[in-house]
Amino acid sequence: MSGAAKKMDSGAAPLVTELRDVHLAMVDAVLAGEGITRVEEIAGDAAGGRVVIRLPRLGIEPDVSDAIERELIRSGDAEIGEVALLATAGEPAPQAREILHLAAIACLTEVAIVEAREEVEQNLRGSFLEELRSRDDLEPGEVMRRAARLGCDLARGVVVLCAELSTERPRHVLATIAGEWEGALAEALDGRVYALLPATGGDDAPERTLQRAGALATRLQRYGTVGLSTFHADISGLDRAIQEAELVLDVLTVSGAPISAQDIGTGTYRLLFRVLASHPEEIRSFYEDTVAAIVRYDDQYRTSLIDTLSSYLDHDCNMNATAAAIYAHRHTVAYRLERIKELTGLDPTLSEDRERLGLGLKAFRIIAPRLPR
């Protein structure tokens, strides 16, 4: 080797060693969990200036508009961020460009670790929620412990949310739930989003939690249809709470289902959904004993007895108001009410029978999606 070559080699060797040491320090910081901030510090010290990393995938988006050097962070063909050396008073180190490249590689390692961790947590959340959906033999203590390990405290009760999305962005919906409800446990399963919303508030936890859950459901309606359970203080009934939220969602998503989200929020409907989740045969039996005969009569003869009864009850049993609402003559309303009495054995003009018919209507509305067509 010539003298000139030996001199160049001796000058390059320390630089290679320095770059190797910087790279190892960055990787060690990432593996130790010190994160992107530590990578920025190491890169800045070696590059002779302030280094800032932009990684939107990890929620890191600083202003890098005044950068004097940049290195893109690429995952395959996709650009996922950049490492920027910002303007400083002094001159950056000659090897600044190489330092930024090494920082970009370290960032890819951090992204891989975060995504692997998220995948593991997602699998744990998914398997836990799937077990809650499909099993009723889980011990409450085990449920509490597993939920707590996932950051969800169920000690004081829970409301379950179930959503059918019309968007292709379930991750955005999950992020919205997590961002607005501390300790929520949410995951996408079988095309739906499920979430456990732990109790909030003090002695008013049932009312406060339901109120907050309703507000969250309203905000999520831009992404699809949302069903909520009632407040469940007893975790041993968590499987029924999930079924309850699914039932509410089924009713709301069925085309033409004669019930609104506002109606579902009323006390009677909440009670009926809770009974339906735990004792569906009781709701079906009550439906059969009240309005089933007129539902079948309407289906067979294309009449409107159910609509007439509903309007009659909604208008406080006022015949004229009912007639105006359904665009029929007052005598037509009277005839239909008499026909309802004949078919059901219940007289809509008597208060006690009217109450039974009203509950029967509500029972019909929540089981309508599951009735044979």
Image (cartoon, rainbow, N blue to C red):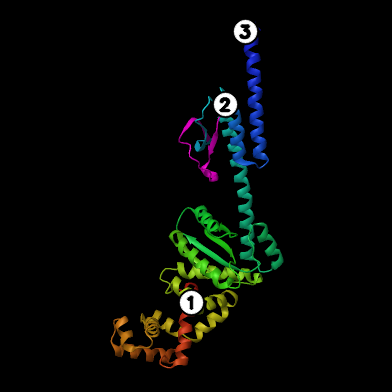
Residue designated by label 1: 266
Mark sitting earlier along the chain (3/2): 3
Q: Does residue 372 appear in this view?
A: no
Q: Residue at x 47, y 92 (%)?
A: 352
The answer to which of 133 and 70 lies nearer the viewer is: 70
Relative to 268, does residue 28 appear above or below in the rendering?
Answer: above
Mark 1 surroundings: few (<14), some (14-19) or many (≥20) residues within 10 A: few
The quadrant of the rendering that contains the C terminus is: bottom left
Q: Nearer the viewer, mark 3 or mark 1?
A: 3
The quadrant of the rendering that contains the N terminus is: top right
Determine whether the residue tagged by mark 3 lies in a helix, strand or loop: helix
Mark 2 surroundings: few (<14), some (14-19) or many (≥20) residues within 10 A: some
Q: Which stretch appears magenta?
A: 47-73
- Tell me if 200 is positioned left or right of 266 in this view: right
| Magenta stretch holds residue 55 | yes
Residue designated by label 2: 98
In percent of width and height, residue 105 lies at 59, 33
Do residues under tags 3 and 1 come within 8 Å of each other at their CB atoms? no
Determine whether the residue tagged by mark 2 lies in a helix, strand or loop: helix
In percent of width and height, residue 253 lies at 46, 67
Q: Residue furthest front?
A: 89
- Tell me if 45 is positioned left or right of 219 in this view: right
In percent of width and height, residue 203 lies at 60, 73
Residue designated by label 3: 4
The answer to which of 318 and 4 lies nearer the viewer is: 4
- For the residues labelled 2 and 1, the Cα–Cα distance comes to 65 Å
Determine whether the residue tagged by mark 1 lies in a helix, strand or loop: loop
Do residues under tags 2 and 1 come within 8 Å of each other at their CB atoms? no
